[in-house]
């Protein structure tokens, strides 16, 4: 069955619902709206505690543009029951959050980006500003499984975060700044290379061939 609803001059068309009008106590006109919304071409879900203008964009709790962009006003909680997933065997089907880039192109640096933004006050106005980001995706060109992760932070101009940490397809990590380790540093490897002009060691005893 299909319900056809037609609006007038873009003033919105939808359904308004009030669930607390006929209550024995604490009755109210709280109202939910589902539809195209007032003076907007997108779809939204709105709420007004007093029942006023629930179809207006200012009251929207979820808004979807005609291009598919979605804005949610509030916290998102993903609920999914997951069984034990062994280390090294993670797949997209195990995800609680899957960021999928549908671009079909044989290129590297493909993937998805998570950005962290807030409002910056310039003395007169508040402006949305990018502070940090996480990027992940394809590390090499071609039909490979190679992937990478990059972490960005900003300490300079607005909306210009710089690369802070990169983990490549071989799990090699490169830090762009200083690294402070609060605990012990344990290196299990064959070769340790230190390219340092000045090496400061507080202990006056350096042991060689220990444990042999």
Image (spheres, rainbow, N blue to C red):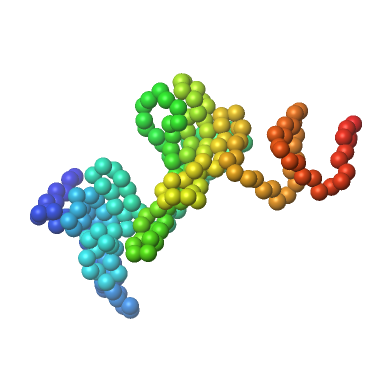
- The residue drawn where x is 73% and y is 49% is 183
Q: Is residue 62 above or below residue 171?
A: below
Left or right? Give the position of 98 relative to 58. Answer: right
Hey, which quadrant is residue 111 in on the image?
A: top left
Residue 124 occupies which quadrant of the picture? bottom left
Task: Give the percent coordinates (x, y) of residue 27.
Answer: 29, 76
Q: Which one is nearer the viewer's eye here, 200 or 41?
A: 200
Q: Quadrant of residue 174?
A: top right
Q: Is residue 32 visible?
A: no
Q: Is residue 195 above or below residue 65?
A: above
Q: Quadrant of the C terminus?
A: top right
Q: Residue furthest bottom?
A: 25
Q: Residue furthest top?
A: 142
Q: Position of residue 118 (x, y in %)?
A: 42, 56
Q: In this view of the protein, can residue 129 be seen by the observer?
A: yes
Instruction: Tell me where residue 94 appears, x and y as whole percent.
Output: 51, 38
Query: Which of the pair 83/168 is nearer the observer?
Result: 168
Residue most toward the front? Answer: 197
Q: Residue at 79% across / 45% down in the picture?
A: 201
Position of the N terminus by quadrant:
top left
Residue drawn at x 44%, y 41% as measured from the top left: 113
The mark total stands at 0
Q: x, y percentage for residue 123?
A: 37, 64
Residue ID at (63%, 45%)? 178
- Residue that lies at the very extreme toward the left in this rendered image: 8
């Amino acid at each position: 069955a299909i319900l056809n609803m037609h609006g007038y001059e873009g003033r919105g068309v939808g359904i308004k619902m009030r669930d607390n009008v006929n209550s024995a106590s604490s009755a109210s006109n709280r109202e939910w709206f589902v539809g195209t919304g007032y003076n907007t071409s997108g779809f939204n879900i709105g709420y007004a505690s007093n029942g006023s203008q629930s179809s207006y964009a200012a009251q929207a709790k979820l808004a979807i543009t005609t291009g598919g962009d979605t804005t949610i006003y509030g916290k998102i909680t993903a609920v999914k029951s997951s069984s034990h997933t062994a280390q090294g065997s993670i797949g997209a089907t195990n995800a609680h959050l899957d960021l999928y880039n549908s671009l079909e192109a044989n290129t590297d640096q493909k993937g998805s980006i998570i950005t962290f933004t807030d409002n910056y006050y310039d003395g007169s106005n508040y402006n949305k500003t990018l502070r940090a980001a996480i990027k992940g995706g394809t590390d090499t060109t071609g039909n490979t499984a190679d992937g990478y992760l990059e972490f960005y932070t900003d300490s300079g101009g607005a909306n210009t975060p710089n690369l802070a940490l990169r983990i490549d397809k071989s799990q090699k990590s490169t830090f762009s700044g200083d690294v402070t380790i609060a605990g012990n540093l344990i290196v299990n490897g064959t070769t340790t290379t230190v390219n340092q002009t000045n090496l400061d060691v507080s202990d006056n005893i350096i042991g060689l061939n220990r444990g042999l």
